[in-house]
Image: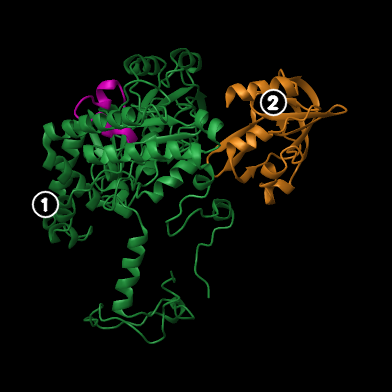
Amino acid sequence: MNFPADLKYSKSHEWVKMEGDVAVIGITDFAQDALGDVVFINLPSEGDTAEAGSAFGDVESVKAVSDLVSPVSGEIVEVNEELADAPETLNTDPYGAWIIKVSGITETEELLDAAAYEAFCAEEA
Amino acid sequence: MKLIFEKSVPGRGTTMLGKCDVEAVALPAELCRQEAPALPEISETDLSRHYTELCQKVHGVNCGFYPLGSCTMKYNPRIDEEIAALPGFTAVHPLAPKETVEGCYEALDTAKKYLCEVTGMDDMTFQPAAGAHGEFTGVLLIKQYHESRGESHRNKIIVPDSAHGTNPATAAMCGYEIVNIPSAPNGCVDLEALKAVLGNDTAGLMLTNPNTVGIFDENILEITRLVHEAGGQCYYDGANLNAVMGAVRPGDMGFDCIHMNLHKTFATPHGGGGPGAGAVGCKGHLAAFLPSSALMDNDGRLQVRSFAGNFLVVIKALTYVMTLGAEGIKEASANAVLNANYLMRKIQGTFEPAFDRICMHEFVLDLSEFKKRTGVSALDVAKSLIDHGMHPPTMYFPLIVHEALMLEPTETESRETLDWAAEIFRKLYALAETDPEYMHNAPHNAAIARPDEVRAARTPILRYTK
């Protein structure tokens, strides 16, 4: 299980990487492992509003459908449309397969650093 | 094995269809297709063998143990099939004059009377084709009820996080906003969480009781009281009715509306591969909104399906109820609960139940610790069971339990079968310690081992092309 040190993590298993004042968001290695093979992703549109703690989309795996929960509030300025055709990238490269980019951030959930998130996952597993 | 289309030889045929004894009538040219349809041409012998071969590749309730949680794969008594095959039920047409099919009406009325008695409801429709359709119909009743009272501002349906996926899907299809509430640590409804979301925008609550982890919610009277107090209606998902028939009635728990899967709780597990029947029952105050349920009622009410729904499934359910009687129905449920508890305790000590307490008709094993230790997942265990001639249990459901296996043995399994099943679970538990690799690659003896579920979900091939 991989927990890159330069990322922040939410308890709903999304990762956040700050690029200037833009938050890049994806799902963690732990999340993709728990989900199993992802077969579909329901993406938001550019210009949509993301709300901290609320779903901005969902992923469907061979096991279940799960909400994608935004760790921040702001405007979705970019969406990784490539995932629509290749949702399996979420499994093969969870930290490369970013899902949305959010700017104009007004609120951020309490996020964990890599060590704290790893401990959280160990407890959760 | 070859597809039936691949077995086709031009010009070959069967004698199964008799000579047409009515005069041929030509359709107008614009209604005719340009090319003949690609129907297989095959001899009767090959046709018979084709279906027998398919049949042998399938594991049904008649082949062996089938503890598929939440599905109630009970044995389908032969008498139900025999009665439903009587010409008086099969050789009739829904448009036949009423006076020529009075027996069918009587059978439907009798089924309604008995099933209302089992569920504590006042009225019922047999129109919905299966469970999800029943849910949809039931929630529309609730919606119509609120609208009739000028309360169409009630736009939220509350669903616990342990619910069947169809519940929120149904509410969404009916135009409702879904409010998800978390379960309490014991897997039941968290009363405080419920209170927090109830309000004058509450249209209703959808609940299964016993719930999806096989636990009867002891607060049920308080739950339905709170929902009613807020002005909402209570919807009972009858998926787990097999646990409580004859012991407690959804109507007495405070529910206003229910659906039953006649095709599982009342014989014909999952339609026996054929159609289902999602009967919807309701209390008197919702009855005015039921779809027209008689064969040819011209009373202006709308229908959710043509005629009387899947009539023969209702006949099978009626036969089932009449064969067992009031005492037998109760005994069936009691034995379903007993069998589940017996199997759970027999397996315990290896795979552990997610909730260590008396269960109802099904129970959930939590394999997350086991997986952490051995690397063998719930999927691997499920696949390994196939090699032992057992249908795997429901996997990865409910979502509130990680690495879940959900078993529902039903009342129709003997003690010997349950002992045999428990022994296989214990064997696999031990095997995971010594040879996890073997389990990662299971099944080893099945016609199909691990189909590519990702490709099947993403690029399914739904029709044959040459």
What secondary structure is found at the residue carrying circle 2? Answer: loop
Q: Secondary structure at mark 1?
A: helix
What's the amino acid at mark 2?
Glu
Chain represented in orange:
A
Q: Residue furthest bottom?
A: B11
Mark sitting on residue A51? 2
Residue situated furthest right in the rendering: A20
Instruction: Provide the residue span drawn in magenta.
Output: B238-256
Observer-nearest of B149 and A86: A86
The residue beneath circle 1 is B103
Choose top left, top right, bottom left or bottom right for residue B356: top left
- Which residue is pictured at 45% across the width and 32% down the height? B398
Residue drawn at x 14%, y 53% is B83
Q: Is B386 placed above or below B70 here? A: below
**Chain B painted colour:** green
Extreme front residue here? Answer: B434
Please, is residue B411 above or below residue B256 in the view? below
Residue type, label 1: Gly
Q: Is residue A110 left or right of residue B1?
A: right
Asked whether, in this view, residue A4 is left or right of residue B440, the answer is right
Q: Looking at the rendering, in which quadrant would you find the N terminus of chain B?
A: bottom left
| Place of residue B395 in the rendered image (x, y in percent of width and height, measured from the top left) | 45, 39
Mark 2 and mark 1: Cα distance apart in space: 60 Å
**How many numbered marks, from 0 up?**
2
* Mark closer to the observer (2, 1): 2
